[in-house]
């Protein structure tokens, strides 16, 4: 989970084999978040966004929280190595980044900037 500010996180769900079971979404956190998954599954919440879920979901018997997890590109090394072995490369001339939400520019809140 990545903190998306306010009470929102960016997250996906994966099974114990690393298969995606729910696509990456921007999720607003409340006591009903993940309820359809927590009903029948244990979910391990990790990343800096997980701390924001503890107050709302921490008492659920199927919710677990990792402590001190820091996201790092080193966790992509195995996947990147497999893609390299298979010759699966992105064409950077045509690659488009994946943004979950549209960027909305606002006025800067720093004094002196207009």
Image (cartoon, rainbow, N blue to C red):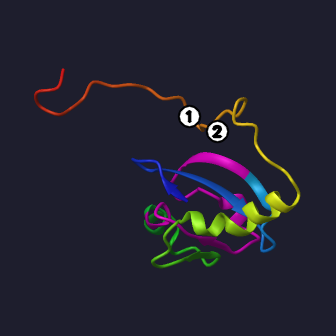
Q: Residue at x 70, y 34 (%)?
A: 95
State the residue at coordinates (77%, 70%). 40
How many other residues sit within 10 Å of disc 2, few (<14), some (14-19) or many (≥20)? Answer: few
As helix, strand or loop, the secondary structure at mark 1 comes to: loop
Percent position of residue 94, x then y: 73, 29
Q: Residue at x 69, y 75 (%)?
A: 42
Quarter of the figure with the C terminus: top left
81 or 13: which is nearer to us? 81
Pick the front one: 71 or 25: 71
Q: Nearer the viewer, residue 83 or 10?
A: 83
Q: Which residue is mark 1?
A: 101
Is residue 36 a member of the stretch shown in magenta?
A: yes
Q: Residue 80 location, x and y as percent? A: 73, 61
Relative to 112, is 10 above or below? below
The spot of residue 64 in percent (x, y) is: 58, 77
Along the line of sight, the residue nearer the viewer: 83 or 41: 83
| Residue 51 pos. (x, y %) | 44, 67
SS at circle 2:
loop
Residue 74 vertical position relative to residue 83 in the rendered view, above or below:
below
Name the mark nearer the viewer: 1 or 2.
2
Residue positioned most to the left: 112
Check the image and report above or below for 49 versus 105.
below
Please name the residue that numbered disc 2 is placed on. 98
Kindly check if marks 1 and 2 are in contact, taking CB atoms under 8 A apart as contact: no
Image side of residue 74 versus residue 88, left or right: left
Give the residues drawn in magenta, as a range: 23-51
- The image quadrant where one finds the N terminus is bottom right
Q: How many marks?
A: 2
Confirm whether residue 30 shows in the render. Answer: no
Disc number for residue 19: none
Q: State left or right for residue 94 relative to residue 33.
A: right
């Amino acid at each position: 989970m990545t903190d998306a500010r306010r009470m929102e996180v960016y997250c996906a769900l994966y099974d114990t084999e690393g298969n995606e079971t729910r696509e990456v979404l921007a999720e607003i956190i409340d006591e009903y978040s993940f309820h359809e998954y927590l009903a029948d599954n244990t979910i391990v919440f990790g990343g800096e966004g997980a701390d924001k879920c503890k107050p709302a979901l921490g008492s659920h018997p199927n919710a677990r929280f990792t402590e001190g997890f820091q996201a790092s590109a080193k966790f992509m090394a195995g996947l990147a190595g497999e893609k390299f072995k298979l010759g699966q490369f992105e064409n950077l001339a045509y690659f488009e980044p994946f943004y979950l939400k549209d960027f909305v520019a606002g006025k800067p809140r720093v004094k002196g900037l207009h």
